[in-house]
Amino acid sequence: MSLLSALYTGVSGLQTFGDSLQVIGDNIANVNTTAFKSSRAEFADLLSQTINGASGRSQLGRGVTLDRISANFSQGSFSNTDRLTDLAINGNGFFIVTDGSRQYYTRNGQLTLNNQGEIVTTSGMQLVGYQYDASGQPLGSLGTLKISQTSTQPHMTGDGSTAGSGVQIHLNLNASSDVMNNFSVSDPSATSNFSTSMTVYDSLGQDHAVQIYFNKTADNTWGWHALVDGGELAGGTSGVPTEAATGTLVYNSSGALKTSTTTQSSFNFTGTAQTIGFDFGDSIDAGGTGLSGSTQFSSPSVVNSQSQDGFAAGNLQSVTVDEDGIISGIYSNGQTLPIGQIALANFTNLQGLFKSGSGLYSDTSDSGVPIVSQPNVGGFGTISAYSLELSNVDLATEFVSLISNQRAYQANSKIITVGDQLMSDVLNIIR
């Protein structure tokens, strides 16, 4: 009977728009939920039967149904916080977290450290990323990220066999200096033209003061001598300077460094021994210009820069997170070493993701397998520390939808009311 069909058509409207109101209510309820993604109800009509009449084929509708609830994955605004472990993704991607048995995906970056130093969500799930070893080198494997409180190992000053290893000194030696070719270890200050000092480190991380003296032995030729207190050397006497390394610097008539040689380098520190390389910059004989490192001009002798690659053991002082998601530790010895890198995941079909509650999503066959990458690579977003992504719910839009759905619900209820009245009229015919 057509009246009964009309009643059920109205019922379909009530059910569908009731579900739609629930979607809107869920959006409004989560307006302050971190990284919440709003949803919308999408409708589809229902067909009951086809009627063939004189004027052609006609179709009767049977009402409406909720076709699907689609998520809006647009970017939410950012809120600044005072916690380093509050992270937000600016662009595409999801954080990967795990409960130990399976992985989930979320935009909610409210993270913290547990008592094991692991980076976890508010529900205790561990953040997944690319792991690094104790020396700050990437392992190339995914795993849970952990900020270790252990010390970094010391690194001794190198032997100069690799770039940046050992001691680097760039200076200018005054070409007008007097020749002093009788350098004496027992009285280095009086038998040299210039000196500088620096600290080097042995394999145990112990620091040692080294004084480096320069004396002009002839025109355009200088000798250099690295002295250490004898008390720091095996078999030495405290307070007595000992020459541990020596060499020569030869310049051309334009003041450019022609050759740099080391004739001796033997630092036999107590408990350990090592060779330390001394680099005074590029030289002409080595294929350089001889002007970018050490020079000999008629101006006061001065050190332009000096450095060395050794350092002592250090304790973790603080942590930083950059836009590439690299988590770095800053240690008491002045070193900054990568601890790990946050990994992001994306999907071919975001609408295929399954909501698992608490801002978590699970992958399904509809979403496709996760595409995992580093942040700021290949279309993936960047990471912002001290920030949280806000809900992308637009209250103005939701209130307009609320009014529209309320009117639709009321209109469908009228269909049922009118249908009921007509049914009563039919029943009254026999009276």
Image (spheres, rainbow, N blue to C red):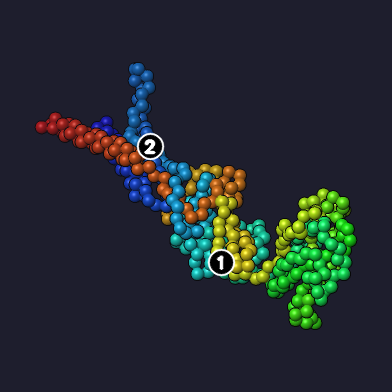
Q: Position of residue 323 (x, y in %)?
A: 56, 51
Amino acid carrying label 1: it is: Gln
Residue hosting label 2: 43
Q: Horizontal placement of 143 versus 268: left or right?
A: left
* Label 2 to label 1: alpha-carbon separation: 56 Å
Question: Residue 171 appears in which quarter of the rendering?
Answer: bottom right
Q: Horizontal placement of 378 versus 247: left or right?
A: left
Mark 1: which secondary structure? Answer: strand
Q: Which residue shows up at 77% across the image and 55% down it?
A: 299
Near mark 1 (Cα within 10 A), the count class, few <14, some 14-19 or many ≥20, is few
Mark 2: which secondary structure? Answer: strand
Q: Which residue shows up at 55% across the image and 47% down it?
A: 381
- Observer-nearest residue: 417 or 221? 221
Tags 2 and 1 touching, CB below 8 Å: no
Residue hosting label 1: 317
Amino acid carrying label 2: it is: Phe
- Observer-nearest residue: 279 or 91? 279
- Where is 27 relative to 147, above or below? above
Q: Position of residue 287 (x, y in %)?
A: 85, 50
- Where is 326 relative to 155, above or below? above
Asked whether residue 350 is in view, the answer is: yes
Q: Position of residue 210 (x, y in %)?
A: 74, 70
Q: Horizontal placement of 275 versus 422: left or right?
A: right
Which residue sits furthest left? 431
Which comes before the other along the chain, label 2 or label 1?
A: 2
The mark closer to the camera, 2 or 1, is 1
Q: Which residue shows up at 57% across the image and 69% down it?
A: 149
- Split into 4 quadrants, where in the image is the N terminus? top left
